[in-house]
Amino acid sequence: MKKMDAIVIGAGNGGLTAAAFLAKEGKKTLLVERHNLPGGFATSFKRGRFEFEASLHELCGFGKNPGQGDVRKIFESLGIADKIEWADIPAAYRMITLDDKKTTDASMPFGIDAYIDKMEEYVPGSKPSMKKLFDLAEEIQKTTEFFGSLKGNYTANAVKEILKNHMNFVRTAGYSVNDVLVALKVPKSARDIFKAYWCYLGVDCDEASFIHYISMIRLYLAYGAVIPKARSHEMSSAILDAFEGLGGEVWFNAHVEKINLENGRANSITLQDGTKVYADHIICNTSPHNVFGKMIDQMDVPDYELRRANARKLGARGLSVFLGMNKSAEELGIEDHSYFIYNTVDSKKQYELMQKIETNDVLAAVCLNKADPDCSPEGTSILYFTTLYTDDAFREIKPEDYFKTKQFIAERMIMNFEKALGIKIRDSIEEIEVATPMTYARYTDTPQGAIYGYEAQAWDGIVPRIMMESMEESIPGLRFAGGFGTQLSGYSATIASGRNMAYKTLSDMEKEAEQ
């Protein structure tokens, strides 16, 4: 019988980080992964002479100096921050709308002061309210750092500290992005430009938590953003190396079929080949839909977990077009790394348009060469186009129409990129690949190909999840890391969630040892 201190299911970045932090504390940890390599979404693939990044547009929370940014601190703690070759993203974003009635075209820099100054150029008179907005962001950042220092131990003294010194967090916790921007009297045009990142959360700004959004955009602006030159898989490989160097054990091509419970507590896993491994603590880097729907006997699943999983809405489903171009970015007329192209500045209206293939023109575009000029052969360039669907838009597509639908969407994304930038790229395409929600569902086993975990609706955003976190532990010994967890989705969030779940598991172990 094989017995471990902890088992981590899934070698996505959340699972990798959780496993590494457990091993760092000397815990006998087994990481099991159904694929033959780590990373999950964090991977790459080759077509012709191009290597495409599968999912990462840019990584926030990794500052330029030691000790800056949560992700850098995590990587420093694991000894890998300097083992990855990073490329800096040159600027925050360019936002363009396709609405002929009122076209927005704004290019925004990194750096909070530079961002505020640039906003003043686009929207004269916006500077005082934008300054108030980012002063509030600094206060909220201090509160989140305080929460992090608690490591999940919310004592009476901690609550007193929050009520005494962190009231602006409390005041804004229940409000949406739009609610707070209006309350601060940020001019509408400035609000429209400021909200460009909303599609990275997959929920419109009438629903998105202000605290979640402002925390994300502050990370981008304060520390900038980076990408690994060897694609996102370089991060996953580095975390795995750290885990194994700390004594951790990893099994690839190991598909977990069951999580077994004894007396209501998770105590082991069973693989498809019948292998059984025991541990008192299991962390899942996969969705609760999969765990409670497939991996645990239904008689053992608490009714609460079934009700909650059914109440939650799956987050945005992704579709990406990968283009290898036979001309350089300069020859094509591409000036920026990151583009957000929308039908309209109204995020609620855009969210509704994203429910159907026929009405959705959202486009998050990246030209990798603007950050890393050497990412493709000389005289060529790489483009990634990603769109999101807020519903299972492919549900009604017949198998015989699948390829035609992919082609239709790719054609329209290329056309809209050309329209937004006023350039032509179609005749310079050397390689093209399209990944649909079905692609992501097949590769990562996410329900319906959801790439953002569960949608951060008002009742189920990051603040309510943190407040209700203890209720998410209805099966002792079982926790979740990754995009379906408390921290929500995104590279920085999933890495942080892995560390946090490791801390909570270590705390559980300490309490059990004292009993």
Image (cartoon, rainbow, N blue to C red):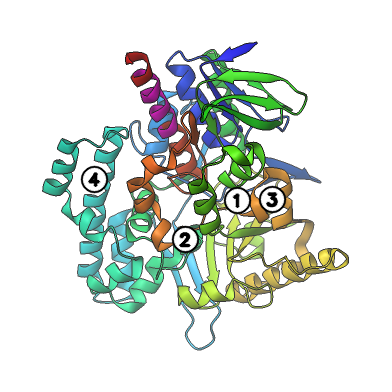
Residue linked to disc 2: 93
Q: Secondary structure at mark 1?
A: helix
Residue linked to disc 3: 440
Disc number placed over residue 368 in the picture, else none: 1
Amino acid at dot 2: Tyr
215 or 264, which lies in front? Answer: 264
Q: Where are the magenta residues, as a range?
A: 500-510
Q: CA distance from mark 1 to mark 3?
A: 21 Å
Q: Residue furthest bottom?
A: 101
Write the residue at 56% across / 79% down: 98
Write the residue at 72% across / 58% down: 436
Q: Secondary structure at mark 4?
A: helix
Callout in the foreground (1, 3): 3
Residue 184 lies in what quarter of the image?
bottom left
Q: Residue furthest left?
A: 164
Residue linked to disc 4: 143
Q: Main secondary structure of the magenta part?
A: helix
| Residue 89 screen position, x and y as percent | 48, 49
